[in-house]
Amino acid sequence: MSQYMDISGIHLYSINGFPIVYINQRRGNNNHRFRSNVMHKCKICEWEIDAASSALFCSMECKFRSVLGSQLDELMENSSEVTEISEEIDEPVMKKRHRRKGSPHRAPFF
């Protein structure tokens, strides 16, 4: 990812031993309580960042918001205005799946 985009200043998280970067902004939910005494926070959304990290942002979206400002909102609005072309697609006919046994074969009652 770092080959294609500048991810400097974005906090790297570790999941299953792999470093990851969040794309979307970390939004606060009911389970996440913001502490006022935390020194390291994201500049945009104030999400708590580890003290060991020198990162300024929690995600790529927060970094874009700091660089582009209100232009990012305009770009997102313009992208939602793009009309989608819907074509009718013939769905393939599903063949009836043959069961291995239709009904159990038991010995007749004599």
Image: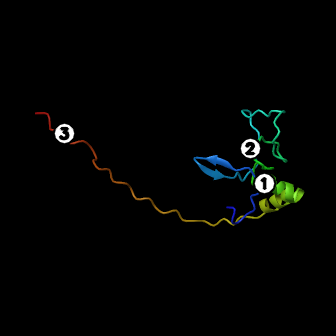
Calculate the distance from the C-alpha at mark 1 to the C-alpha at mark 3. Answer: 72 Å
Q: Nearer the viewer, mark 1 or mark 3?
A: 1
Going 76% across and 41% down the picture, which residue do you hit? 51
33 with respect to 15 (left or right): right
Q: Quadrant of the C terminus?
A: top left
Q: Circle 3 is placed at which residue position?
A: 106
Q: Circle 2 is placed at which residue position?
A: 52
Residue in front for this viewpoint, 30 or 84: 30
Instruction: Residue 56: give x, y in percent of width and height.
Output: 81, 50
Check whether the beta carbons of the residues at disc 1 and disc 3 lie within 8 A of each other.
Answer: no
Instruction: Residue 29: give x, y in percent of width and height.
Output: 74, 37
Say above or below: 107 vs 15. above
15 with respect to 103 (left or right): right
User: Which amino acid does the dot numbered 3 rest on?
Assistant: Arg
Q: Earlier in the sequence, mark 2 or mark 1?
A: 1
74 with respect to 88 (left or right): right
Check whether the beta carbons of the residues at disc 2 and disc 1 lie within 8 A of each other.
Answer: no
Rendered image: mark on residue 74:
none
Instruction: Residue 102: give x, y in percent of width and height.
Output: 28, 47
Going 63% across and 67% down the picture, which residue do you hit? 87
Secondary structure beneath label 3: loop
Calculate the distance from the C-alpha at mark 2 to the C-alpha at mark 1. Answer: 13 Å
Q: Nearer the viewer, mark 2 or mark 1?
A: 2
User: Which amino acid does the dot numbered 1 rest on?
Assistant: Gly
Q: Earlier in the sequence, mark 1 or mark 3?
A: 1
Q: Earlier in the sequence, mark 3 or mark 2?
A: 2
Instruction: Residue 84: give x, y in percent of width and height.
Output: 71, 64
Crowd class of label 2 (few under 14; some 14 to 19; many from 20; radius 10 Å): few
Q: Circle 1 is placed at which residue position?
A: 9
Where is residue 38, by image quadrant? top right
User: Which amino acid does the dot numbered 2 rest on?
Assistant: Ala
